[in-house]
């Protein structure tokens, strides 16, 4: 229900409530159930009045649509649309009477005005809001699919993007090494200028290491491919919903035109028939046959509409009014099913998009992990060793002579060689979880389990080990702060998947996290994709890392992870 309410709010405040389908709904409703008219009017006279009033209503809603698009604040747009819904619905009986008077036709007595207004308000609101919600769902799904297509298209350029990033990183490191090797150092002022330049180089290398080698989406939300034809499949509305809405919509009109006893029997019959139709489509043999279930649901809705028409004729309602249920009830039931199906598809596509973007970032991270680690080492060497040496020299030797400056310059040559080789030698950082686990074990019981193949992957990739250590440190900190019993278990295993090996890291601690608990904003573990979840009575921080020996893996694989609702389509 909350999802449906959010969809309604998005349709009201999104700035696109009025579309061409709004006018189709106005015309359809105007020619069917929207406003009771005197029984003495002929079908041609009824059609004339309905057509004129529909044209005037469409003109009013054209103005509403223009005003809606001119407003910039969502709440203002929602207020405008809601006000227009109420005003046009309540004013429609007056408009009908005015058109009838102008044409010399009979009108209903003033005593019927309250029930006519209620009928208009209910049906008009249901029809126009439902139309806007369906259109918004379809539009949002298309935009999400277009974004997903762009992500997947750009994925194919991942190897080239990684190679470009690697080449630029190597060029930047080589430029810094050349600066150290070829710097002209004759005086202390030259050393001071070199130290200032090295500070800029160190910041540039560090920034390059932190930036992602991705490109922004190009071309906007455009997808020129023909729409994919999907098999008929509907998510059925809750049992009895269609019948309940239909009964509420026609109740004001029925109160005026049907005897109380007949009205009660008609409402009970509508609810019973509608609920039975919903139950028929849910029989177990149809559970695994979505196309057959959808066809049974549509056929059942049509039969319910025909049954309601038969009941109306038995109660003395004449054609064509008696035929209205045969048209409106199936349309209402199908709209509810399409709405639920559309919302489900939209959730699925957004999860696919989110997973695709996350996996694209993981692939880029995998391809540049060693390069970024080298950039960090180069930045550390330039900042701590080379720049630090320059600042230290100028402080100790404010009036240094040529010989002392030459000695300083000679000391820069080994640093230049070290900077130039940062991509060829492993960094000095620890690649083992042992020191971290032993440190925390002094404060609380920590049980660590690192599989042999996982340990080999960590030893082969120091940058991966750093990321794993960051996640484990975050999980142990959470356990120390929030666990019911201050203890933790760390599991690091290598898992084979269809999309390649994944290193799965888990930090488990007693005590279920509170609902909606998340990692602290800005945490590095969160940026690395770690997720906090409840498993039984424990809190579990879990992260998955891509593992590969090729720094620029070939091909493109989308590996999606979904939680919660079952997803029937793979990305």
Image (cartoon, helix red, strand yellow):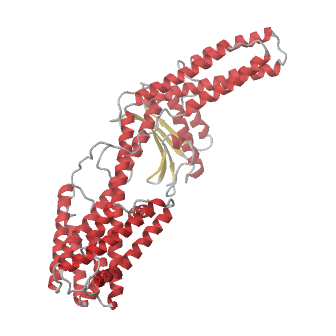
Q: Is residue 277 left or right of residue 372?
A: left
Position of residue 33 relative to residue 457, above or below, is: below
The answer to whether residue 565 is visible is no
Query: 124 or 524, which lies in front?
Result: 124
The location of residue 277, given as percent across then percent down, is: 20, 69
Quarter of the figure with residue 244:
bottom left
Quarter of the figure with residue 226:
top left
Residue furthest top as drawn: 403
At a point 34% along the width and 68% down the height, the residue shown is 58
Number of disc labels: 0
Q: In this view, does 41 lie to the left or right of 26?
A: left
Position of residue 281 relative to residue 271, above or below, is: above
At a point 51% along the width and 36% down the height, the residue shown is 468
The location of residue 523, given as percent across then percent down, is: 57, 44
Residue furthest right as drawn: 399
At a point 23% along the width and 73% down the height, the residue shown is 274
The location of residue 54, given as percent across then percent down, is: 30, 72
Query: 286 or 260, which lies in front?
Result: 260
Q: Is residue 325 left or right of residue 71?
A: left
Quarter holding the N terminus?
A: bottom left
The location of residue 193, given as percent across then percent down, is: 74, 21
Quarter holding the C terminus?
A: top left
The answer to whether residue 186 is visible is yes
């Amino acid at each position: 229900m909350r999802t449906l309410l959010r969809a309604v709010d998005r349709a009201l405040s999104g700035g696109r409530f009025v579309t061409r389908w709004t006018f189709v709904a106005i015309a359809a409703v105007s020619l069917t159930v929207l406003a009771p008219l005197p029984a003495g009017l002929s079908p041609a006279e009824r059609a004339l009045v309905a057509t004129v009033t529909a044209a005037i209503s469409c003109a009013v809603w054209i103005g509403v649509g223009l005003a809606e698009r001119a407003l910039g604040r969502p709440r203002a747009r929602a207020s405008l649309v809601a006000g227009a819904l109420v005003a046009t619905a309540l004013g429609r009986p007056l408009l009908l009477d005015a058109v009838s008077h102008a044409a010399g036709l009979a009108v209903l007595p003033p005593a019927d005005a309250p029930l006519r207004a209620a009928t208009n308000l209910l049906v008009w609101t249901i029809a126009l809001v439902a139309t806007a919600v369906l259109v918004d769902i379809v539009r949002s799904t298309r935009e999400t699919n277009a974004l997903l297509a762009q992500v997947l298209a750009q994925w194919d350029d991942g190897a080239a993007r990684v190679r470009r990033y690697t080449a630029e990183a190597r060029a930047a490191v080589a430029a810094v090494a050349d600066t150290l090797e070829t710097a002209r150092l004759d005086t202390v002022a030259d050393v001071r200028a070199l130290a200032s330049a090295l500070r800029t180089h160190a910041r540039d290398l560090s920034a390059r290491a932190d930036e992602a080698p991705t490109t922004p989406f190009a071309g906007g939300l455009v997808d020129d491919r023909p729409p994919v034809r999907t098999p008929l499949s509907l998510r059925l509305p809750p049992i009895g919903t269609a019948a309940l809405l239909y009964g509420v919509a026609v109740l004001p009109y029925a109160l005026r035109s049907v005897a109380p006893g007949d009205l009660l029997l008609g409402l009970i019959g509508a609810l019973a028939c509608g609920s039975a139709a919903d139950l028929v489509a849910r029989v177990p043999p149809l559970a695994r046959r979505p196309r057959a279930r959808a066809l049974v649901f549509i056929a059942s809705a049509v039969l319910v509409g025909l049954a309601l028409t038969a009941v109306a004729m038995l109660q003395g309602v004449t054609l064509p009014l008696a035929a209205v249920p045969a048209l409106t009830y199936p349309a209402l039931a199908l709209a509810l099913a399409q709405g639920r199906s559309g919302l489900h598809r939209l959730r699925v596509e957004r999860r696919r998009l989110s997973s695709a973007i996350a996996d694209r970032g993981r692939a880029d991270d995998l391809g540049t992990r060693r390069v970024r680690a080298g950039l960090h080492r180069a930045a550390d060497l330039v900042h701590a060793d080379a720049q630090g040496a320059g600042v230290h020299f100028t402080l100790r030797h404010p009036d240094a002579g040529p010989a002392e400056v030459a000695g300083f310059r000679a000391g820069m040559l080994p640093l230049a060689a070290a900077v130039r080789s940062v991509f060829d030698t492993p960094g000095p950082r620890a690649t083992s979880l042992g020191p971290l686990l032993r440190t925390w074990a002094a404060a609380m019981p920590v049980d660590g389990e690192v599989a042999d193949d996982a340990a080999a992957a960590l030893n082969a990739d120091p940058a991966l080990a750093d990321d794993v250590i960051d996640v484990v440190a975050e999980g142990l900190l959470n356990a120390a702060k929030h666990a019911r019993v201050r203890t933790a278990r760390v599991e690091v295993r290598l898992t084979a998947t269809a999309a390649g090996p994944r290193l799965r890291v888990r930090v488990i601690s007693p005590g279920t996290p509170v609902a909606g608990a998340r990692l602290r904003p800005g945490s590095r573990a969160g940026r690395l994709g770690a997720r906090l979840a409840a498993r039984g009575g424990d809190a579990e921080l879990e992260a998955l890392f891509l593992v590969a020996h090729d720094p620029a893996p070939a091909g493109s694989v989308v590996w999606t992870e979904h939680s919660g609702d079952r997803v029937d389509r793979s990305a």
